[in-house]
Image (spheres, grey):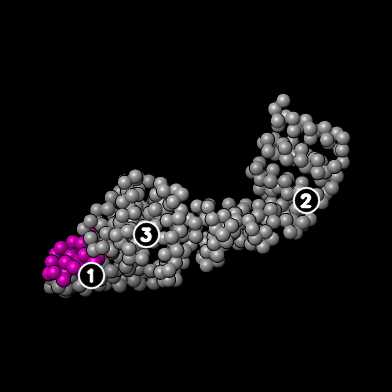
Amino acid sequence: MDPNERRLQELTERVKVDPKNPEILKELGNHHFHGGNYKEAIQCYQMALDIDPRFYKALYNLGNTYYKMDDTEKAVHYWHRAIEVKPDFDHAFFNLGYHYFQKMFWKEAIRSLAEAARLNPSAADTHYYLGKCYHQTNRLAEAIEEFKKAIALAPEDPEYHYELANSSYDLASVSGVPSHFQVAVDEWTRFLKEKPQEAKARNNLCDALLQLGRHEEALAEIEKVLAREPEYPPALITKAEILERMGKTDDAVPLFNQAKALILRKDEFQPLVKYISECLRRIRLQYGKVLLNEGRAQDALQEMELIIRDDPDSCDAFDLKARILDEMGQADEATRVRGQAKTLRDKAGSTGDSPSTH
């Protein structure tokens, strides 16, 4: 006889012998649950509750079963009922928190997961998901603390290191404290020891190295990504940014353009289009200033026209265009262009938007 069939037969016989024992009915329900027989599981849990309406294990397992059946409203209801009976039931708090996490109800998720962590501080996954919720609500220092707790409990899990790196990078970006970039470098490096083929993580590592001014290291790492995925847009963008920081703008521009062309064919990278356009505008503005200082006003003017073509709201481009026209002796046209820049700024001010200045 199959072991599962034997176990089912054993539990069924025990129920016959002791039909008023809710624990045995719960065990039979669990057997059906693990076999994917959710209707039978619900029937067993309900029979257990008919005997003891405050049997929190059956309430909790009912919630789990309904969750598996995608009936989240009933799942939440029964988890709450289990908590009413057993207020220190950390598993029920965790399941509620995880459900709210999946639904992106961050405040509710934080409330439930924080309580689960208080009740059972030795559960690494609770700290992990609580950290992710804190990250989503920009409570980055708290996110970092939770990821550190998760790592202390389960140091071999690479995902914990990945998320600590993410939050550390973002905290460095908003706080201006470079030591957080170093933490990001260390943690992404640790993650890549376990998952060396992960292009996103290595690209992120390169970005953190770039922020620390370690350009040669960043360039060496990004080449590893592009060797495996030569048309991975984020890596092309990162390499372009590295080259730009190294003063190699002539090499950076084609990479930005290549990434932009690829992104236009890939929906998942569409949010990067605006970022690339901003990078290209920044480079062209810098290049236009260089050309103007070299006395190449006509070439500088062409660069500004390219920026304005791609971003007709770029106040900086209009400002520099006006300056170039002044240098070329076209004062009336320069005045008209300055008026365009002023109109753009006034429009941005009235709508609450910020003009394109970089």
Q: Earlier in the sequence, mark 1 or mark 3?
A: 3
Which of pointers 1 and 3 indicates the residue nearer the eye?
3
Residue 117 in the image: state x and y as whole percent. 64, 60
- Specify the amino acid type for callout 1: Leu
Q: CA distance from mark 2 to mark 1?
A: 71 Å
For mark 1, does the 10 Å Cα neighbourhood hold few (<14), some (14 to 19), or many (20 or more) residues?
many
Which secondary structure lies at badge 2? helix
Dot label at residue 207: 3
Q: Residue at x 31, y 54 (%)?
A: 220
Query: Residue 309 sits in which quadrant?
Result: bottom left
Q: Residue at x 36, y 61 (%)?
A: 209
Please give left or right for residue 42 compared with residue 129 in the image. right
Which is the main secondary structure of the residues drawn in magenta?
Answer: helix
Q: CA distance from mark 2 to mark 3?
A: 49 Å
Where is mark 1, residue-wise? 320
Q: Which residues are magenta?
A: 284-311
Where is mark 2, residue-wise? 56
Residue in front for this viewpoint, 58 or 146: 146
Q: Earlier in the sequence, mark 2 or mark 3?
A: 2
Residue in front for this viewpoint, 128 or 56: 128
Question: Which corner quadrant holds the N terminus?
Answer: top right
Q: CA distance from mark 1 to mark 3?
A: 30 Å
